[in-house]
Amino acid sequence: SAVISQKPSRDICQRGTSLTIQCQVDSQVTMMFWYRQQPGQSLTLIATANQGSEATYESGFVIDKFPISRPNLTFSTLTVSNMSPEDSSIYLCSHGPSGSTDTQYFGPGTRLTVL
Amino acid sequence: GENVEQHPSTLSVQEGDSAVIKCTYSDSASNYFPWYKQELGKRPQLIIDIRSNVGEKKDQRIAVTLNKTAKHFSLHITETQPEDSAVYFCAATISSGGYQKVTFGTGTKLQVIP
C-alpha cells in the first residue's frame, strides 16, 4: 500500500480563520478522498479529489467552505475556511484504488480544534 | 445512495470468547466490503476484506462472511485478546474501473475484558 502522510497532525485555531491540511502519498494514485471524523463518530466523506478535475463534494459540504486542490497524482490539500467551533474534528485523507487493490488507506489524520 | 447499518454499537466480551459484528447494506451495486480497526487516536487500518464473488474469507482469528442475497456481511473474531479492543467499521464499496464510492457503517466499540 502507498504511504500517506498529513500535515499538520494537529492545530488549534481561532474562529473565523482558515487552515490548510496537506496530504502526501508516496506513489501516484488517481483518487484521493477527504473525510471528517467527529469524536466517537464514523467517517463522513467530504469530497473526492481527482487530479486535473474539480473535486466532487458530498451532500452537506460545499467548495466555498472546504476548497480542495489536487495539483498532481501524489498530493492534495483541504482548506477549512472561516472556521467555527463546529468544525472541530479529525480530518483524514485517503487514497482510492491503486494497482490491484480496492482498499482505501488512510493518512494519520489532522486533529483540529477551533476556539 | 448506499446506506450501511452496523450492529451492535458497543460490544463487551471476555478474553478468549468470540465477537461478532454485523452490517447490512442497501445498494446491490456494492461489490467490495472492507473492515477497518481504529484504535484510539490512530487512523483506521484495514484488517480484512471480501469481494462480492466470495462468501467467506478467513485470516487467522478473523473471518468475514457475506450474504449477497440478504445484503449483509459480518465480522467474526475468535479467541479475543485485549489488544482486539478498538472501534471496528464496516464499509460497502462500489468499485469499478478506477471509480470508487465507499460508505462506512457507524462503528462498533469492542471491549475485551481480561
Image: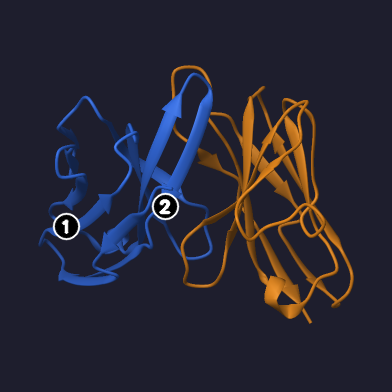
Chain colours: A orange, B blue
Q: Chain of mark 1?
A: B
Residue lying at 53% horizontally and 72% vertically, measured from the top left: A39
| Residue B114 shows in this picture | no
Residue extending furthest bottom? A115
Residue underneath mark 1: B20
| Residue A8 shows in this picture | yes
Task: Check disc 2: other Cα within 10 Å, few if <14, some if 14-19, many if 20+.
Answer: many
Residue underneath mark 2: B104
Between marks 2 and 1, how big is the CA–CA gap?
A: 17 Å
Rendered location of residue B6, percent (x, y): 29, 60
Task: Check disc 1: other Cα within 10 Å, few if <14, some if 14-19, many if 20+.
Answer: some
Residue lying at 44% horizontally and 18% vertically, measured from the top left: A100
* Residue kind at label 2, given as amino acid type: Phe
Please identify, in this view, whether the residue under mark 2 or under mark 1 is nearer the observer: 2
Which badge, 2 or 1, comes first in the chain's sequence?
Answer: 1
- Is residue B102 toward the left or the right of residue A107 in the image? left
Residue extending furthest right? A17
* Residue kind at label 1, given as amino acid type: Val
Residue lying at 75% horizontally and 34% vertically, measured from the top left: A75
Where disc 2 sits, the SS reads: strand
Q: Nearer the viewer, residue B80 or A65?
A: A65
